Amino acid sequence: MSDTPTTSSGRRSAAVAPLIPRTAVVPAAGLGTRFLPATKTVPKELLPVVDTPGIELVAEEAKSAGAERLLIITSPGKDGVVAHFVEDLVLEHTLAARGKESMLAKVRNAPSLLEVASVIQESPLGLGHAIGCVESELADDEDAIAVLLPDDLVLPGGALGRMAAARARYGGSVLCAIEMPSDEISAYGVFDVEDDPQDPDIKRVRGMVEKPAPEDAPSNFAAAGRYILDRKIFDALRQIEPGAGGELQITDAIALLIEQGEPVHVVIHEGTRHDLGNPGGYLKAAVDFALDRDDYGPALRAWLEQRLAKD
Ligand code: UTP
């Protein structure tokens, strides 16, 4: 049977992709210690990939996937992160008066993407704790949230849409995984999975191991920073105990959901990721994005070739 929906007039309409949750949550209240001293005063989410902060790239991804609202979790004193999404009329008028149309378009992009709200996490008590802070901001009919970690760029776009389709089919929570080579797997959270006979790109999650030794890794599927979490995650977060460093881990809450029999799946993303949370990963992202740009790419490529020839 075709799964193309039929309209009330009896005519077939084009298949409609399931919507991702209305609210895209972006946790940005961490300390960013791996990026000190820069992050002493500059939030790592505002560090530019070429000229655009990582958090703006992630907001664009949420918008393209169909989210309506960006809910930024921030910490006391990190006001710049939310300010980036607020119109700056003085700057806009100055650019307009000077005829700087392309700069004006760049400045207007972030505030025009999505409705933006924020919630404060008073202390950096872990990603799980941060996500727990958003529950009271949700409407009663929001039965799931999307979570996008702003220091993880998942390329190309489209992962959230496939995750929403998986949730529409299986219910529960859906995470994103990228297959990594065995010698790199120890840097990540790794999924213990069971194949789905109907779809090689979706797997049921049995468990998760944080940063395993290569010989102990249950698979080569590493967690990427994209989640669609059923609202039941908030009950699970209330039930778990803080782990290392007194932090509430989101992986512990997801493990509890699995234990309670809730469906948890991963969508295998065919693509790459950049970890903007450490200088090494950030530099790779900046070079990767710059090489693709018409304005900076050719000169950077020529310089890199010369520079590498010297080694
Ligand atoms: P990370 O562990 O990558 O960020 O958390 P961090 O803690 O800022 O970085 P390091 O380890 O000290 O260098 C992933 C995401 O979760 C957010 C971070 O801001 C980041 O976007 N986070 C983490 C919170 O919002 N609150 C927390 O308590 C911890």
Image (cartoon, grey):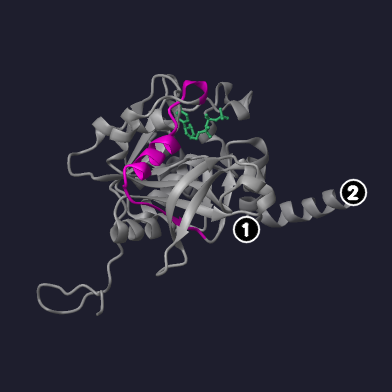
Please provide the residue range marked out in magenta: 244-269
Which residue is located at x 52 percent, y 34 percent? 46
Q: Quadrant of residue 282?
A: top right
Q: Quadrant of the N terminus?
A: bottom left
Residue hosting label 2 = 310
Residue type, numbered disc 1: Asp
Toward the viewer: 154 or 77? 154
Mark 1 residue crowding within 10 angstroms, few (<14) / some (14–19) / many (20+): few
**Direction from residue 5 to residue 108 in the image, left or right:** right
Residue type, numbered disc 2: Lys
Name of the residue lying farthest toward the right: 310
Residue 235 appears at what percent x and percent y? Answer: 28, 34
Mark 2 residue crowding within 10 angstroms, few (<14) / some (14–19) / many (20+): few
Toward the viewer: 268 or 77? 268
Query: Is label 2 in a helix, a strand or a loop?
Result: loop
Whether residue 180 can be seen here: yes
Residue hosting label 1 = 294
**Direction from residue 162 to residue 8 in the image, left or right:** left
**Direction from residue 146 to residue 178 in the image, left or right:** right
Toward the viewer: 20 or 78? 20
Residue 217 appears at what percent x and percent y? Answer: 60, 47
User: Is residue 307 on the magenta stretch?
Assistant: no
Toward the viewer: 233 or 18? 233
